[in-house]
Structure formats: structure tokens, C-alpha cells
Image (cartoon, rainbow, N blue to C red):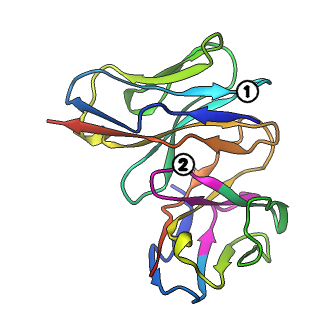
Amino acid sequence: EAEVAQSPRYKITEKSQAVAFWCDPISGHATLYWYRQILGQGPELLVQFQDESVVDDSQLPKDRFSAERLKGVDSTLKIQPAELGDSAMYLCASSPSGQGWDNEQFFGPGTRLTVL
Amino acid sequence: AQSVTQLDSQVPVFEEAPVELRCNYSSSVSVYLFWYVQYPNQGLQLLLKYLSGSTLVKGINGFEAEFNKSQTSFHLRKPSVHISDTAEYFCAVMDSSYKLIFGSGTRLLVRP
């Protein structure tokens, strides 16, 4: 069964360092999402890609976060510099398209980031 | 703006007992509702969804939910829970741009 892959699964870093997370969506899925899930809260959308284009990054802290999906397949989310408040689970999801009420999102296992 | 409220942060229940996890939504337009489950250190898995039609929706693992427009609720139920149902459960609403808005989650703790 096709799955969304993410790496690393766990990352520990010190504040002010740079970190990067990788996501490989289900083959053929045009839409890719990055979510941040703070402990005790629900996921919050950071950025949404349609193929290689960003369609929504309204909640992405652009002073320190960046995301790219250069060839419209896999994606990288970067934080530079990391801050203590960035400690969270970072989830990647993909869907066949970004349109329609029946457009199911499939989630990866996430990367748990701890900033010391 | 649309929003979702999950009133219970944690629900403890004994194995084989019934359970209800509560979800209320706020929306002024057509409503599309979802329940996801998250097992420890894993991503989210779709349990069930309401898009239209019958207000009683059946999902995987024996779960069901009922859409109640007058009470703006979409509570999740299971008649008999198992130890393996211990997980975090998230209710979500899809907004007009097809973006998912999640509640804060309810931790279901099933005890033997």
C-alpha cells in the first residue's frame, strides 16, 4: 500500500541551528501539505503545494521557515534558525488534488523535533 | 471563520464499554466533517467523513458518527472499545478552500 514517507523520524537540535525535514508523497499526488502539531494541539497547516507551486503559506513563519517542492514530487521544509518554540511534530500529507470535498489527505508518520 | 471544539481533552473508559467523543463545529456555510485517529508516534489516519446524505456515518474499526445540524455537532461513537483503540482522536472541518481545520484532540484511554 502506498504511503507518505518522512525523514528523519526524530530530530534533536540546539536553538539557532538549522534543521531540514524531507517528505515523499504518494506517487501521483499533486498536492502536498506540511502541518505543525504542537503537543496537546491539533495539526495546523503551514504550507500547501499544488505540484511545484505554493498555493497557501499564510501560516508559515517566513522569517525562519522555508519550504520547496522543486520538481513537484518530494519536498523539504527548513527552519533556520530553530527556536525553542519550534519543538513540535511536523506532519506531511498528500492528496490526489487540492480541490473537492472528497479530496482525502494521507498523512506520513511525522518528524518529531526537539529544540534544546 | 470555521472552527472545531473538542470539549474533552481525555476520556478514560474500560475495555468493552461504549464511548462517545464529542465534537462541535462553527460554520456558516455547507459543512464537511472528518474524524482522524493518531496512534502514538504516528501520522493521522482517516476514520470517517461526512460530506452529504445520511447523517449517520460509519467508519473503520467499528466507529460511527452522527451529524446533527441543529446542535452543530459531529460526535464519534463506538459501542464496545478495545485496548487497541487507545489513541488521540481529532475532529476536523473542511473550509471553503478545502483546507482542514482541526480541533485540539481527545485522548481516548482504554483500561483493562
Helix, strand, or loop for circle 2? loop
**Which chain's residue wears label 2?**
A
Q: Are marks 2 and 1 in contact (CB under 8 Å)?
A: no
Q: Residue furthest top?
A: B70
Tell me, yes or no, whether the highlighted magenta stretch contains residue A30: yes
Residues B6 and B84: in front is B6
Residue range corresponding to the magenta coloring: A22-44
Instruction: Tell me the quarter of the picture where residue B24 sits.
Output: top right
**Left or right: where does residue B101 sit relative to residue A83?**
right
* Residue denoted by label 2: A42
10 Å crowding of disc 2: few (<14), some (14-19), many (20+):
many
Provide the secondary structure element on which disc 1 rests.
Answer: loop
The answer to whether residue B50 of the structure is visible from this angle is: no
> Are dots 2 and 1 on a single chain?
no
| Classed neighbour count for the residue bearing mark 1: other residues with Cα under 10 Å, few (<14), some (14–19), many (≥20) | some
Where does the image place residue A55, in percent across and percent down from the top left?
Answer: 84, 58
- Label drawn at residue B27: 1
Amino acid type, callout 2: Gly
Left or right, A99 with respect to B33, comes to right
Q: Compared to A111, does A97 lie above or below?
A: above
Task: Report the residue at 60% width, 76% height from top.
Answer: A22
C-alpha gap between disc 2 and disc 1: 18 Å
Q: Amino acid at mark 1?
A: Ser
- Measured along the vertical axis of the image, is residue B30 above or below residue B101? above
Where's residue B76, x and y in %?
46, 25
Task: State the residue in front, A96 or B45.
Answer: B45
Task: Give how far across and how far down residue A14 sits, in percent.
Answer: 49, 87
The reply, left or right, for residue A104 in relation to residue B38 is right
